[in-house]
Amino acid sequence: MIGLIGKKTGMTQIFDDTGRLTPVTVIEFEPNVVVGKKTADADGYDAVVLGVYDMRKIRITKPYAGQFPEGVAPKRILRELRDFEKEVAVGDKLGASLLEGLRYVDVTATSKGKGFQGVQKRWNFAGGRSTHGSKFHREPGSTGQRTYPHKTFKNVKLPGRMGRERVTVQNLRVVRVDAEAGCILVRGAVPGPRTCTVVVRDAVKKTN
Amino acid sequence: MNLIQKIQAEQIRADVAPFNVGDTVKVHFKIVEGKTERIQIYEGLVIAMKNAGIGRTFMVRKISYGVGVERVFPLNSPRIDKVEVVRPGKVRRSKLYYIRTKIGKKSKVKILLPSRKEEVEAQQN
């Protein structure tokens, strides 16, 4: 597996060779620095720790800075990528060129928060009739009945906080990799607001 | 200029001749049939332009065998070979949807004549 930490820049459209408009999301990459490596012997699994964005000096605490090896400035965002297939050394800088040649990617990010939502938006309940005397509009319905089961089961779909959770979108087609500008364009939407941090990996379910 | 604007700027076609709503135009549109490519000409009145940037489209209306036909073209599409202005029109609104309900002389748009200043410039050249 290979991957990078990026920033969602936003969406636009691209004409392809046949003249069709394709919706694309632009993901930018600052240089990803290899901050550390985890090995099966020492940590129980293989992984590469990538970091992006230098921190303001005043924000760096000694304990935080202590986890970075010498010669690597403390980074604001760290992500571990398991079973990294490319040979990298600590201190290496990785850019968008790493993703060249990939046809499909998976993108992981924290989705937009929707706040407290009812069951129709949150769980796609159908809802009731609006008119003809119906008093059942957007309610969740019954949850625990009476004698049996006499309780609300766990994990029953009810209103509550929606969004702002880790979401992975799989099999997004790579439309273009621009190593010079340090960005890639993937077909379709990516979770999260603009400027949010995303992790782009090669697709698990497609052979690249 | 941010990255998205840059990506869009690459694709925006400045070579498609500038035309306006109300003009009668000939759209030379590339049609791909299997392996061969040919150019189809669609002539009609531009009745609307919509959206901005890369997604800008224009709507061309013509009467074909007594039936009104409206076709929407993406302005920046690579499949547009060129757009010829046959007759510039003088209109006072940006959307000419009213033309759909008009017949005869009322469905015509007045020709836009060049202003005196433009005429003088044209003669000098």
Image: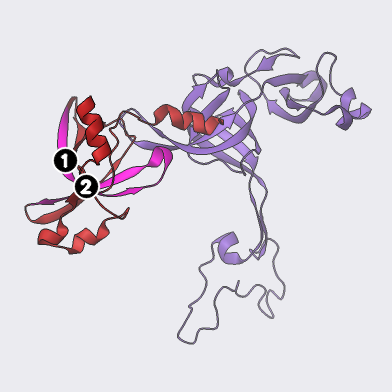
Quarter of the rendering containing residue A198: top right
**Furthest residue toward right:** A62
Residue ID at (15%, 58%): B107
Residue placed at 55% from the left, 18% from the top? A180
Instruction: Compare residues A30 and A107 and report the one nearer the observer.
Output: A30
Q: Is residue B86 magenta?
A: no
Chain bearing mark 1:
B
* Dot label at residue B89: 2
The location of residue B24, given as percent across then percent down, is 19, 44
The quadrant holding residue B106 is bottom left
Q: Is residue B82 visible?
A: no
x%, y% of residue A142? Answer: 62, 75
Quadrant of image for the N terminus of chain B: top right
Q: Are marks 2 and 1 in contact (CB under 8 Å)?
A: no
Q: x and y percent of residue B8 in the render?
A: 45, 32
Chain for colour purple: A
User: In front: A132, or B109?
Assistant: B109
Give residue B42's mark. Answer: 1
Chain B is which colour? red
Residue B47 covered by magenta stretch: yes
**Left or right of B34 in this view: B2:** right
Q: Residue furthest bottom?
A: A133
Q: How many marks?
A: 2
Q: Secondary structure at mark 2?
A: strand
| 2 vs 1, front mark | 2
Horizontal arrangement in the rendering, residue A49 relative to residue B113 (left or right): right
Q: Amino acid at mark 2?
A: Gly
Q: Quadrant of residue A23?
A: top left
In-front residue for pair B15/B123:
B123
Instruction: Answer with mark 2 or mark 1, whichever residue precedes in sequence.
Output: 1
Magenta extent: B38-64
Q: Position of residue A68 (x, y in %)?
A: 84, 21
